[in-house]
Amino acid sequence: MDKEFFRGKRVLVTGHTGFKGTWLCKLLELWGAEVYGYSLASPTEEGAAVFQSSGVAAGMTSVLGDLRDLPKLAAFFADCQPEIVLHLAAQPIVRESYRDPVGTYSTNVMGTVHVLECVRQCSSVRSFLNVTTDKVYENREWVWGYRENDPLDGFDPYSNSKSCSELVTHSYQKSFFVDGRTAVSTARAGNVIGGGDFSVDRILPDCIRAALAGRAIEVRNPYSTRPYQHVLEPLAAYLLIAQRQYEDGKFAGAYNVGPEDCDCVTTGELAELFCRAWGQGQQWRHVGDEGPHEAHFLKLDCSRLKTTFGWQPRWHIREAVEKTVAWAKLYAAGGDIAGCMEEQIGGFFAEEDGSRLDG
């Protein structure tokens, strides 16, 4: 990936106030892009504080708005005339989708329709990437990874709404973008961890909250296996896809973005890695869970991304957890969040040939 490619490019990010969005905008700003963001405000006070303390807000044009407000979104597109659009905004929590399925579908499906309609109406857009999830697949609890041509059919309202978002994207691509003006891709990423995630019902944020409160971590499903990766892993892949399809539309399509098989671990193993990284005698315990259905085993086959672009994951799960813990401790101590993010970004991209950094 050529970082200089993004210098001066007008890049619009939906969901820019969120965990992944904040890191993505930080990357783009460091690489000299003109960054525009459209999103609701962060749902947590901590998330809002990170967005400000990261320095991201000062280096971009930020608009707070709902994807379901098509006139406002269209006006923003018309104002900034983006060349690249990265669509991250979503209702991303499985349990919340059971509590509010209508809100989840309206945001994740019609929100995507609105973004794509704005892309269709905006002649400046050359590259569009819709970020979905590894949960879009019909999960049969296979021990091998899902490939991009496997059936889509997420079980819960969140996963299913993201499957629908994929189908909407495919329909728009075939109906409106066959002329090659705009290259369109989707990226199906695994579970992401890293500093700045304060979401509810996610294992690493729950671990951090428990550790800071001086209590044991409560783990609902310690035997569920997921493809965990540091937030910089998928962001690097998103930007690589966006760049390459901008340069040549033949690279457009659907891509899985996940870690190596050895980094697909159970929730219990992840909690144990966190406890070791945190120290101070931190412990976790299994608690009963009467909650709604969630998949027990999920893994991705990322052969297409690797073969097409020569992409490789860089940080193993142990190092990803250690980076997350270091960020969280600095945040709790009132340290330099912007500096920490820049240091971690610099370390991640230190080897530009894409080889693994083993720390």
Image (spheres, grey):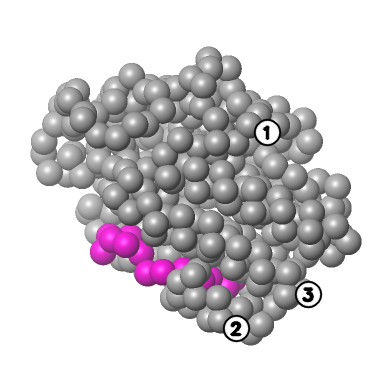
Cβ atoms at labels 1 and 2 below 8 Å apart: no
Let me know if residue 42 is in the magenta part: yes
Residue on which the image places disc 1 = 148
Q: In the rendered view, would you say 173 is above or below 260?
A: below
**Number of numbered discs:** 3
- Quadrant location of residue 104? bottom left
Which residue is depicted at the point 38% across and 52% down?
101
Q: Amino acid at mark 2?
A: Ala
Tell me the residue at 81%/46% (across/down): 251
Does the magenta-highlighted stretch encompass residue 271? no
**Could you tell which of marks 1 and 2 lies nearer the N-terminus?**
2
Q: Which residue is mark 3?
A: 123
From the viewer's perspective, is 37 left or right of 284? Answer: right
Residue shown at the point (35%, 64%) measured from the top left: 42
51 or 334: nearer the viewer: 51
| Mark seen at residue 46 | none
Label 2: how many residues lie within 10 Å, few (<14), some (14-19) or many (20+)? few
Front residue of 11/286: it is 286
Residue 143: give x, y in percent of width and height: 53, 15
**Label 2 residue SS:** helix
Residue 67 placement (x, y as % from top left):
50, 69
What amino acid is labelled 1 in the image? Glu
Q: Is residue 294 above or below residue 133?
A: above
Give the left or right position of residue 143, taking residue 92 as reference. Answer: right
State the image coordinates of residue 201 (x, y, percent, origin top left): 29, 42
| Residue 277 shows up from this direction | no
Image quadrant of residue 293?
Answer: top left
Residue at the top extreme of this rendering: 143
Find the magenta span and give its range.
35-47
Between 79 and 160, the residue placed more toward the observer is: 160
Measured Cα–Cα span from mark 1 to mark 2: 34 Å
Relative height, residue 329 to residue 128 (above, below): above
